[in-house]
Image: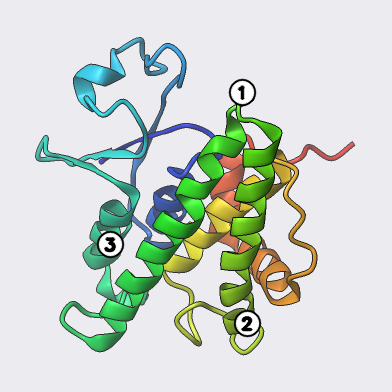
Protein backbone atom coordinates (compact mmCIF):
# COMPACT_ATOMS: atom_id res chain seq x y z
CA UNK A 1 0.00 0.00 0.00
CA UNK A 2 1.10 3.56 -0.70
CA UNK A 3 0.19 6.42 1.63
CA UNK A 4 0.38 9.86 0.09
CA UNK A 5 1.15 12.41 2.79
CA UNK A 6 2.36 15.87 3.69
CA UNK A 7 4.43 16.18 6.88
CA UNK A 8 2.26 17.00 9.89
CA UNK A 9 -0.94 17.22 7.84
CA UNK A 10 -4.02 15.13 8.61
CA UNK A 11 -2.27 12.27 6.78
CA UNK A 12 -0.22 11.81 9.96
CA UNK A 13 -3.26 10.11 11.48
CA UNK A 14 -3.40 7.13 9.06
CA UNK A 15 0.40 6.99 9.13
CA UNK A 16 0.25 6.45 12.91
CA UNK A 17 -2.58 3.92 12.55
CA UNK A 18 -0.69 1.91 9.93
CA UNK A 19 2.34 1.67 12.21
CA UNK A 20 0.24 0.83 15.27
CA UNK A 21 -1.45 -1.96 13.27
CA UNK A 22 1.85 -3.27 11.95
CA UNK A 23 0.80 -2.72 8.34
CA UNK A 24 3.55 -2.00 5.81
CA UNK A 25 2.90 1.18 3.84
CA UNK A 26 5.12 3.03 1.42
CA UNK A 27 5.18 6.74 2.23
CA UNK A 28 5.05 9.10 -0.73
CA UNK A 29 5.41 12.78 0.05
CA UNK A 30 3.27 15.32 -1.77
CA UNK A 31 4.12 19.00 -2.31
CA UNK A 32 1.00 20.95 -1.38
CA UNK A 33 1.85 23.86 -3.67
CA UNK A 34 2.96 22.10 -6.85
CA UNK A 35 0.73 19.03 -6.35
CA UNK A 36 3.68 16.87 -7.34
CA UNK A 37 4.83 13.78 -5.49
CA UNK A 38 8.44 13.28 -4.43
CA UNK A 39 8.72 11.01 -7.50
CA UNK A 40 7.67 13.85 -9.81
CA UNK A 41 4.20 12.45 -10.49
CA UNK A 42 1.15 14.70 -10.85
CA UNK A 43 -0.78 14.08 -7.65
CA UNK A 44 -3.98 15.34 -9.23
CA UNK A 45 -3.82 12.40 -11.61
CA UNK A 46 -3.68 10.09 -8.60
CA UNK A 47 -6.21 11.89 -6.42
CA UNK A 48 -8.28 14.52 -8.28
CA UNK A 49 -9.32 16.00 -4.91
CA UNK A 50 -5.77 17.26 -4.65
CA UNK A 51 -5.28 16.73 -0.93
CA UNK A 52 -3.92 14.11 1.43
CA UNK A 53 -4.29 11.52 2.76
CA UNK A 54 -4.76 9.10 -0.09
CA UNK A 55 -4.15 5.39 0.25
CA UNK A 56 -3.43 3.38 -2.87
CA UNK A 57 -4.15 -0.28 -2.27
CA UNK A 58 -2.16 -3.12 -3.76
CA UNK A 59 -5.22 -3.80 -5.95
CA UNK A 60 -4.84 -0.35 -7.49
CA UNK A 61 -7.94 1.02 -5.78
CA UNK A 62 -7.59 4.45 -4.20
CA UNK A 63 -9.12 5.30 -0.85
CA UNK A 64 -9.36 8.92 0.26
CA UNK A 65 -10.66 10.82 3.32
CA UNK A 66 -8.88 10.25 6.60
CA UNK A 67 -11.86 8.89 8.51
CA UNK A 68 -12.38 6.15 5.92
CA UNK A 69 -8.68 5.33 5.62
CA UNK A 70 -8.04 4.89 9.35
CA UNK A 71 -11.02 2.56 9.70
CA UNK A 72 -9.94 0.53 6.69
CA UNK A 73 -6.44 0.15 8.13
CA UNK A 74 -7.76 -0.79 11.57
CA UNK A 75 -10.10 -3.38 10.07
CA UNK A 76 -7.15 -5.08 8.37
CA UNK A 77 -5.86 -5.95 11.84
CA UNK A 78 -8.92 -6.26 14.11
CA UNK A 79 -6.75 -7.85 16.80
CA UNK A 80 -5.00 -4.48 17.18
CA UNK A 81 -8.06 -3.00 18.90
CA UNK A 82 -7.65 0.20 16.91
CA UNK A 83 -11.35 0.13 16.01
CA UNK A 84 -14.26 -1.75 17.62
CA UNK A 85 -15.96 -4.42 15.55
CA UNK A 86 -18.34 -3.27 12.83
CA UNK A 87 -21.99 -3.30 13.86
CA UNK A 88 -21.29 -2.82 17.56
CA UNK A 89 -22.31 0.21 19.60
CA UNK A 90 -18.67 1.08 20.38
CA UNK A 91 -18.03 1.29 16.62
CA UNK A 92 -20.77 3.89 16.31
CA UNK A 93 -19.24 5.81 19.20
CA UNK A 94 -15.97 5.72 17.25
CA UNK A 95 -17.76 7.15 14.22
CA UNK A 96 -19.29 9.79 16.46
CA UNK A 97 -15.86 10.87 17.67
CA UNK A 98 -14.28 10.85 14.21
CA UNK A 99 -17.13 12.99 12.90
CA UNK A 100 -16.82 15.43 15.79
CA UNK A 101 -13.07 15.83 15.34
CA UNK A 102 -13.50 16.30 11.59
CA UNK A 103 -16.36 18.79 11.59
CA UNK A 104 -15.81 20.68 14.83
CA UNK A 105 -11.99 20.76 15.06
CA UNK A 106 -10.27 19.84 11.81
CA UNK A 107 -12.22 22.17 9.53
CA UNK A 108 -12.21 24.99 12.07
CA UNK A 109 -8.41 25.14 11.87
CA UNK A 110 -8.45 25.79 8.11
CA UNK A 111 -8.93 29.59 8.18
CA UNK A 112 -6.24 29.87 10.87
CA UNK A 113 -3.65 28.61 8.38
CA UNK A 114 -4.69 31.24 5.84
CA UNK A 115 -2.65 34.43 6.36
CA UNK A 116 -5.38 36.51 4.71
CA UNK A 117 -7.98 35.57 7.32
CA UNK A 118 -9.07 38.76 9.16
CA UNK A 119 -8.07 39.10 12.81
CA UNK A 120 -11.67 39.07 14.04
CA UNK A 121 -12.42 35.84 12.16
CA UNK A 122 -9.21 34.30 13.47
CA UNK A 123 -10.22 35.13 17.05
CA UNK A 124 -13.74 33.78 16.54
CA UNK A 125 -12.35 30.49 15.22
CA UNK A 126 -9.98 30.17 18.17
CA UNK A 127 -12.82 30.79 20.62
CA UNK A 128 -14.91 28.20 18.80
CA UNK A 129 -12.10 25.65 19.01
CA UNK A 130 -11.64 26.21 22.73
CA UNK A 131 -15.35 25.62 23.27
CA UNK A 132 -15.23 22.35 21.31
CA UNK A 133 -12.04 21.23 23.00
CA UNK A 134 -13.66 21.76 26.40
CA UNK A 135 -16.03 18.87 25.71
CA UNK A 136 -13.16 16.51 24.90
CA UNK A 137 -11.11 17.79 27.84
CA UNK A 138 -13.91 16.83 30.23
CA UNK A 139 -13.91 13.33 28.76
CA UNK A 140 -10.13 12.96 28.90
CA UNK A 141 -10.07 14.14 32.51
CA UNK A 142 -11.89 10.89 33.36
CA UNK A 143 -10.18 8.40 31.04
CA UNK A 144 -6.91 8.00 29.19
CA UNK A 145 -8.36 7.51 25.70
CA UNK A 146 -11.39 8.80 23.85
CA UNK A 147 -13.15 5.43 23.84
CA UNK A 148 -12.05 4.45 27.33
CA UNK A 149 -9.20 2.15 28.23
CA UNK A 150 -7.34 1.66 24.96
CA UNK A 151 -5.89 3.63 22.06
CA UNK A 152 -7.96 3.80 18.86
CA UNK A 153 -7.91 5.57 15.50
CA UNK A 154 -9.87 8.43 17.06
CA UNK A 155 -6.96 9.15 19.39
CA UNK A 156 -4.55 9.26 16.44
CA UNK A 157 -6.82 11.75 14.69
CA UNK A 158 -7.30 14.00 17.72
CA UNK A 159 -3.55 14.01 18.40
CA UNK A 160 -2.79 14.97 14.80
CA UNK A 161 -5.29 17.82 14.65
CA UNK A 162 -4.42 19.17 18.09
CA UNK A 163 -0.74 19.33 17.15
CA UNK A 164 -1.69 22.16 14.81
CA UNK A 165 -2.53 24.47 17.73
CA UNK A 166 1.08 25.52 18.23
CA UNK A 167 1.35 26.53 14.56
CA UNK A 168 -1.61 28.92 14.73
CA UNK A 169 -0.92 30.45 18.15
CA UNK A 170 -3.83 28.66 19.83
CA UNK A 171 -3.21 28.29 23.56
CA UNK A 172 -4.78 25.09 24.90
CA UNK A 173 -2.86 24.99 28.19
CA UNK A 174 -6.07 25.49 30.17
CA UNK A 175 -7.13 21.95 29.23
CA UNK A 176 -5.20 19.67 31.57
CA UNK A 177 -6.88 16.48 30.37
CA UNK A 178 -6.16 17.28 26.74
CA UNK A 179 -2.57 18.27 27.49
CA UNK A 180 -1.92 14.99 29.31
CA UNK A 181 -3.55 13.10 26.43
CA UNK A 182 -1.27 14.74 23.87
CA UNK A 183 1.74 13.76 25.96
CA UNK A 184 0.51 10.15 26.28
CA UNK A 185 0.03 9.80 22.55
CA UNK A 186 3.36 11.47 21.72
CA UNK A 187 5.17 8.99 23.98
CA UNK A 188 3.89 5.94 22.08
CA UNK A 189 6.75 4.26 20.15
CA UNK A 190 4.81 4.04 16.90
CA UNK A 191 3.80 7.70 17.13
CA UNK A 192 7.43 8.61 17.66
CA UNK A 193 8.31 6.52 14.61
CA UNK A 194 5.70 8.30 12.47
CA UNK A 195 6.85 11.73 13.62
CA UNK A 196 10.47 10.82 12.91
CA UNK A 197 9.65 9.48 9.45
CA UNK A 198 7.92 12.77 8.59
CA UNK A 199 10.77 14.86 9.96
CA UNK A 200 8.64 16.28 12.77
CA UNK A 201 10.84 15.49 15.76
CA UNK A 202 13.09 18.22 17.12
CA UNK A 203 16.73 17.31 16.68
CA UNK A 204 18.66 17.23 19.93
CA UNK A 205 21.51 19.73 20.23
Residues 145 and 82: in front is: 145
Residue at image mark 2: 138
Decide if residue 190 is on the left or right side of residue 60.
right
> Is residue 198 in view?
no
Which residue shows up at 49% across the image and 61% down it? 156
Pick the quarter of the image with the C terminus. Answer: top right
Disc 1 or 3, which lies upstream in sequence? 3
Q: Earlier in the sequence, mark 2 or mark 3?
A: 3
Q: Residue at 11%, 38% (x, y): give it.
A: 61
Q: Are marks 2 and 3 in contact (CB under 8 Å)?
A: no
Residue visible at 57% across and 83% down in the picture: 139
Query: If you read the primary sequence from the N terminus, does the residue marked by circle 1 or circle 2 appear first?
Result: 1
**123 left or right, relative to 65:** right
Q: Position of residue 178 (x, y in %)?
A: 67, 70
The disc placed on residue 71 is 3
Q: Position of residue 68 (x, y in %)?
A: 25, 55
Quadrant, the N terminus: top left
Relative to 129, 107 lies left or right: left
Under circle 2, the secondary element is helix
Q: Is residue 194 left or right of residue 54?
A: right
Q: Residues within 10 Å of mark 3 (few under 14, many from 20)?
A: many
Measured Cα–Cα span from mark 1 to mark 2? 33 Å
Q: Which residue is mark 1?
A: 116
Q: Please tell me how crowded label 1 is: few (under 14), some (14-19), or many (20+) other residues with Cα within 10 Å.
A: few
| Residue 16 higher or lower than 5, as above or below | below
Give coordinates of residue 82: x percent, y percent. Answer: 37, 71
Amino acid sequence: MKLYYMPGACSLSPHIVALEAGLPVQLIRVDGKTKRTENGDDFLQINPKGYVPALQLDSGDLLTEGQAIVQFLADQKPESGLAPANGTLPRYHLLELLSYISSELHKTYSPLFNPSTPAEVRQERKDYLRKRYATLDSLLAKQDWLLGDHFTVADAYLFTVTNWAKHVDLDLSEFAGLTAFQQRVAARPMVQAALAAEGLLKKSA
